[in-house]
Image (cartoon, rainbow, N blue to C red):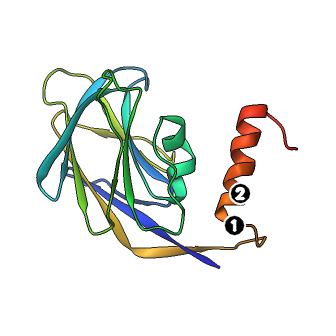
Amino acid sequence: LDARGLLLAKSANGWQAEAINDVVLFGRTRMHPMDYKVYCDGCFVSSYRSDGLILATPTGSTAYSLSAGGPVVEPTARNLIVSPICAHSVHANSYVLSPERTVTVQTEKTGYKPIFLSADGGRAFSLRNGDAVEIRRSKYETKLVRLSNKSFCDILQKKMLMGVLGHEE
């Protein structure tokens, strides 16, 4: 059994969820740029104008986060990954933070654009303009059954090869 960390996300207006892969903030169509400000333990880290923002666990780093240009993080690590989706800036970076950090995302305060939040691709929850979402490591873990003795690097190489070539060798 492999222990995997979860994320705990809470919004100011009552939404709360845990996620094994990711928590995603996005506009109505996921192709509508929004403005997000990211804080780590109360200190400003970055602002993004992007189609969305992914906060991922290491388990989720090889899914949607990777597709959005985020880093690959070994699943047994305990980090928190922040990656913009199609950022409208060449200077938009992903961040890999330690598990003790609390990330707060402040959503756009102007306009009437709808903002949504989803955990692990589940039902989208609507936020109000200017709402803040707090994401941290959950006190809970989940256990996943490992079906082979292949290393993370072997599995990653196979996934990447399949992604590039579209088939297994």
Given contact means CB atoms under 8 Å apart, are the residues at marks 2 and 1 in contact? yes
Q: Residues within 10 Å of mark 1 (few under 14, many from 20)?
A: few
Q: What residue is pinned by disc 1?
A: 151
Callout 1: SS: loop
> Residue 114 placed where, x, y %?
29, 27
Q: What residue is pinned by disc 2?
A: 155
Q: Please state which amino acid type lies under the numbered disc 1.
A: Ser
Quadrant of residue 49 within the rendered picture: top left
Q: Residue 130 or 49: which is nearer the viewer?
A: 49
> Residue 92 placed where, x, y %?
31, 32
In the image, residue 3 sits, relative to residue 166, either above or below, namely: below
Rendered residue at 71%/72% (across/down) = 146
Q: CA distance from mark 2 to mark 1?
A: 6 Å
Task: Judge left or right: residue 119 versus residue 115.
Answer: right
Which mark is drawn over residue 135? none
In the image, residue 143 sits, relative to residue 75, either above or below, namely: below
Rendered residue at 16%/59% (across/down) = 41
Is residue 152 shown to the viewer in this render?
Answer: yes
Callout 2: SS: helix
Is residue 26 shown to the viewer in this render?
Answer: no
Q: Residues within 10 Å of mark 2 (few under 14, many from 20)?
A: few
In the image, residue 111 sits, relative to residue 57, either above or below, namely: above
Quadrant of residue 126 within the rendered picture: top left
Task: Judge left or right: residue 92 versus residue 85.
Answer: left
> Residue 23 placed where, x, y %?
41, 49
